[in-house]
Image (cartoon, rainbow, N blue to C red):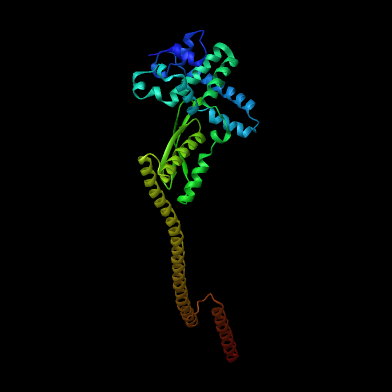
Amino acid sequence: MQNLEKLQEKLGYKFKNLTHLKIALTHKSAKNGHNNERLEFLGDAVMDLIVGEYLFKKFSSDEGDLSKLRAALVNESSFSKFAKFLGIGENLNMSLSEERNGGREKPSLLSDAFEAIMGAVYLESGLQNTARIATAILEILYPRISFNELVRDYKTALQELTQAKFGVTPEYILLGSSGPDHKKSFEMAALVGGRRLSSAVGASKKEAEQKCAQIALELLQNGASHGTSATSGEQAAAFDSDAQSGANRAQNGKKGSRNGGGRARGSTKSEHNDRGANCVQDDRKGSRGGSGRARDGKKSDRAGVPSGTPSAKKSNERSVRDTDKQSSGDQGDAL
């Protein structure tokens, strides 16, 4: 049951046209002809500007640090907190099936609805009023905004931990993506030692990776420090064993590859040597056989010289001279 009066009171703003608020609270599953996607698109850009200006005035950090701070505040996780603070979930208009699937508690739906409300406020009263509302909520939920608290590099922390404990580096894989082009969501998974330890959804791959690393880090640290949850401790212990086994298999695989390569090279050398020896022996045999055949050929040539060879020509010339001499002798006898 919607209680729009209470929501507006928490928001600190009374809508001139209540239809704008109702549309901002309508999920596309309701199929009422209007939903909050267009207002969400607008509100996303408005909040990006408002938070960026707020941080610019509050901190003297460089552009890189300011961008990281803004990314830590302008995201699904942060805006879902804003929505819960305002009580948006209980006022969402959605289909019965979506509600049964926990739609009123889904961070993505809550975040989208909050952005849509900010877009609606902007349309009615402009940027200044929207910034006043947004920064008031921001300072309530984040009273001490600091770089160290908001921007922690969980990926680096997880890598240092897994390298120290298992000797392996975490890997991150994309499981899938969803949503319109202007607001895509990415689901990533963190693998350590070949085993999937955690998964998370973010507005960017980097954001999802950081969330994965945070979940994995908390799980491993809870196991290491005997955390309050027995289940998480057992999971971490089981993971420790599996990750160590995975690391050992990877190292053994590398050694095996090197040894296998050595054996392969040794086998190749042996095969080359064997083939070489056989070829030499065959060549020697062939040479001896060839020499024999050559000698036999020479004998055969002397025994019967073909008529076209130089030796045959010499023999013919000798026969002609002998015939001429005999003819001369016969003529002398006749005289």
Q: Is residue 22 visible?
A: no
Q: Where is 32 relative to 311, above or below? A: above
Q: Position of residue 36 (x, y in %)?
A: 46, 17
Identity of the residue drawn at 44% across and 26% down = 107
Q: Nearer the viewer, residue 130 or 329?
A: 130
- How many callouts does the rendering have? 0
Q: Position of residue 333 (x, y in %)?
A: 58, 92
Vertical comparison of 174 with 17: above or below: below
From the viewer's perspective, is 259 left or right of 124? left
Which residue, as the protein is rendered here, is positioned at the far top?
16
Instruction: Tell me the quadrant of the picture where the C terminus can be found.
Output: bottom right
Q: Nearer the viewer, residue 246 or 161?
A: 161
**In x, y percent, where is residue 238?**
36, 46
Q: Nearer the viewer, residue 78 or 275?
A: 78
Q: Tell me which corner region of the image, top left, top right, bottom left or bottom right, holds residue 318.
A: bottom right
- Camera-nearest residue between 282 and 40: 40
Where is residue 96, by image quadrant? top left
Q: Quadrant of the N terminus?
A: top left
Q: Position of residue 295 (x, y in %)?
A: 48, 81
